[in-house]
Amino acid sequence: MKLSHGGLALEIVVPVFNEESVLEKSIIELASYLQLEMSMTWQITIADNASTDRTPIIAANLADRMPNVAYRRLEVKGRGWALRDAWSSSKATVLAYLDVDLSTDLAALPPLVAPLLSGHSDISIGTRLGQSSRVSRGPKREFISRSYNFLLKRTMQVRFSDAQCGFKAIRADVAKTLLPHVEDNGWFFDTELLIIAERSGLRIHEIPVDWVDDPDSRVDIKQTAIDDIRGLVRVAGSLVKGVIPVQAIYAELGRRPIVPQWRPSFFGQVIRFGVVGAVSTLAFALLFVLFQEPFGAQEANFLALLLTAIGNTAANRRFTFGINGPDRLFTQQFQGLVVFTMAWSITSSSLLVLHAATPNSSSTMELVTLTGANILATLMRFVLLRVWVFRVRRADGAARLMTSSLKTARVA
């Protein structure tokens, strides 16, 4: 459905804290670009979060001189606070924000907001990690950024590639629904918003951007990294406990499958599970050999089994048992870890038995023993995944039928 463009179409928020040196130049450059390149109605809002230099004076002066520029002042520091305050009071159809240093090439603005104005997507983000992105920054920041996003993908099972790029947009109705569930008001604000959005079945559009690092950036990388890791732990816990109502958000805004979800037959599940199990067993063997020398047999077994178990659970959820969407995702991930613990106990016990029987067993014998034990553990995993973790409940079937009926009624 195409969104209505009546009234204010786009509001771009520029969060600032002690930016007296670049504020005026950046706002004038941004306004000039919008006036020349953007045909819809727009507004720039300078969101000052507790600046102590001349930033408030410069911002107020810009708002007085320029008709499409507004100024908001908060007496509390935090990018999340600034965005929450400005977005919550906005009357625009699409809300965006960008960093005041204009590190991202403004030519990316039209493709950023277009899919939101058309109703095609719910959130749009710039990514510095795309193959066609052109980025200029030091190796340290590049390594930290890629490491953080790798950790985010592996721990939270998300698909978006760059959580912290200061170049994002969101539909106002989506922001209104999501903001009450975002707890962080600092640098983790972006990441938390995106995790909740994806877990709720919203469509996140990514565009590659050209980005030049600001050499005068005052971001405390170490403290930000620590805060982000704490945030990941907190959000994961909230999702497992059901504190964040992803199902309610999904029912209201989520992108439902065009084709109704289906579940393979028992024979099909066995075949698919066998394929996943074979790949997982091969991956386990390779990882065990890789980790064995630096860590030792028991530690290598644990790390190899943990890494393959995460991928195995995700693959079986979708490929073997035909489950999509956020429904019970983190509960099932937790149950998968319980099954992993049981599988690990089988393989670990096999090593203990081997070493007790043959104290000087070779690495080859350890690998053979663990491979056999892992096959047994894989069979146990299938049974537990089918009858416990991914068991189809009558309530779930009724819910799917109701969702399908509602969708049919809306189309009609």
Image (cartoon, grey):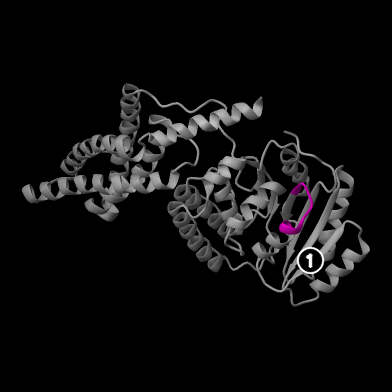
Q: Is residue 24 left or right of residue 331?
A: right
For residue 371, which quarter of the picture?
A: top left
Residue at point 29%, 34% (across, down): 382
Q: Which residue is mark 1?
A: 72
132 and 169: which is toward the camera: 169
Which class describes the residues within 10 Å of circle 1: few (<14), some (14-19), or many (20+)? some
Percent position (x, y) of residue 380? 24, 37
What is the magenta range?
87-94
Q: Is residue 18 magenta?
A: no
Q: Is residue 90 magenta?
A: yes
304 and 114: which is toward the camera: 114
Q: Is residue 94 above or below residue 269?
A: below
The residue at the far bottom in this view is 52
Residue 134 visible in rendering:
no
Q: Is residue 384 left or right of residue 21?
A: left
In what quadrant of the picture does the C terminus appear? top right
Residue at point 79%, 69% (across, down): 21
Residue at point 61%, 42% (across, down): 252
For residue 141, which quarter of the picture?
A: bottom right
In what quadrant of the picture does the N terminus appear? top right
Residue at point 67%, 39% (across, down): 121
Residue 245 visible in rendering:
yes
Percent position (x, y) of residue 130? 61, 42
Query: Could you tell me which secondary element the residue under label 1 belongs to?
Result: strand
Name the amino acid type tagged 1. Answer: Arg
Percent position (x, y) of residue 170? 69, 48
Percent position (x, y) of residue 378? 26, 36
